[in-house]
Image: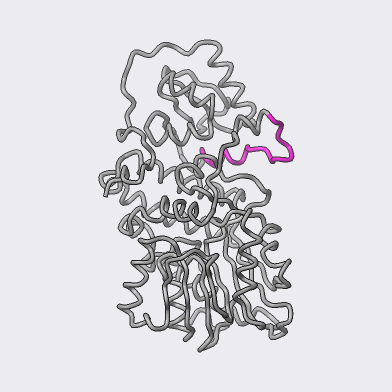
Amino acid sequence: MKQKQFGYLNLPANNKVEQTKKRSPNGTELRLLEFLWRIMQKPKLQLKLWDGTVVGSDEENVPKLVINSPKMLWRFLMNPNISFGDGYSAGEIDVEGDMLHFMEAVFSSRPSLHDSNWIQRYALNRPRLVRRNTLGGSRDNIHHHYDLGNEFYRLWLDEEMLYTCAYFPDPGMSLEAAQIAKMEHVCRKLRLTPGEQVVEAGCGWGALSLYMARRYGVSVKAFNVSREQMQWARERAKREGLANQVEFITDDYRNVSGAFDVFVSVGMLEHVGRENYAEMGHVIDRCLKDQGRGLVHSIGQLESRPMNGWIEKRIFPGAYPPTLSEITKLFEPWKLEVTDVENLRLHYAKTLEHWLARFETHAQQIAMTYDAAFARAWRLYLVGSLAHFNIGALQLYQVVFNRVSNNNLPWSRAHLYKGASE
């Protein structure tokens, strides 16, 4: 399967810039590059041009952003956010030194929206039209990211095909063990009992739905609009004899109908779009029984700012990581009370370390199957995500909620951990 079928990047497949006669940078270019470094809050890195000229930090042994041509320099100066990602993917920009340290330096120096001026906001995060999460738009956005082919994700995810934050009670445990621990952690928070009816909104490849049915004896209706994922999930349910207990429905979460004891959503809220939070809250209220309860697991952030422009354009169209206060807006209008919040930020960083290591093991195969630009783009996405979680620019929230009339609540968190190591 070639990535061009997806109209993914439309960038050169090679990672070497065509060699042409290159002039030396002029004074205007150097002043503009220095100005850009300054409005980036002077991160501990250097900007290196095609002729060896260096602008930026005076410190030694800092990572370098290498711009390989005058044409790429001007594209970078005009729109650094998008052009850096596209330029790196095409091989027109490189990074010398540790790429993770480079990304952490960039993101750590980024000013808060409250502290930044209009020049910084425009230069570093130029406003762009975000693809909306309408019914049709959501299908297109999910297709862009998740329907790249199951074989691609099999190369670097765990055996369960879980593409969400794992849970590491022991930081040294394997990714496979940590993903199973995550599913168990979620189920314990939901306090599932046999015979209950569960609805899962955005079920990925179906691992959690099948785990809930197999281990806790519940019946599940799972909704997802990704064709590739749903085909995988249905085939697995049949193999495991759970097709009568778990129904995988290729449809949007907004079309959920019926009455359920439990609502769960792991890794979908990021794709909903905050303009649709009121509608999602209404869906939860509509489908939960009088004593219902649920859990939402989502990437988040500390202040409300748009998704990184390059990631939104090239990797995750329509994505937005909410703040914790924005997540609570799902529940408050519907008399749904939040009973527990846990932040698993460092667990997501650990998850990404595993994903990145596995991705690098198969990077050459990925480049041959898709192309070099695709492989470099996904490397940048994974490294950038790891950097965001390492420095706290992104969070991972698990929020447990229930009907305010439901007083059947645990008096402690003991149920989450009792016998968990068995």
Can I make out residue 181 in this image? yes
Question: Quarter-wise, where is residue 117 in the image?
Answer: top right
At horizontal 45% and vertical 48% (from top left) the residue drawn is 382
Question: Quarter-wise, where is residue 355 in the image?
Answer: bottom left
Q: Please, is residue 218 above or below residue 366 in the view?
A: below
At horizontal 63% and vertical 26% (from top left) the residue drawn is 38
At horizontal 54% and vertical 51% (from top left) the residue drawn is 319
Can I make out residue 168 in this image? no
The magenta stretch spans residue 103: yes
In this orientation, which residue lies closer to the viewer: 317 or 394? 317
- Give the colour scheme shown: one colour
In this orientation, which residue lies closer to the viewer: 301 or 103? 301
Which percent across, then down, holds residue 187?
54, 77
Which percent across, then down, holds residue 346?
56, 58
Is 316 positioned to the left or the right of 281 in the image?
Answer: left
In this orientation, which residue lies closer to the viewer: 163 or 206? 206
Q: Please, is residue 83 above or below residue 22 in the view?
A: below
The magenta stretch spans residue 202: no
At horizontal 49% and vertical 63% (from top left) the residue drawn is 252
| Span shown in magenta | 102-118
Question: Quarter-wise, where is residue 87 in the image?
Answer: top left
Q: Residue furthest bottom?
A: 195
Which percent across, then down, holds residue 121?
65, 34
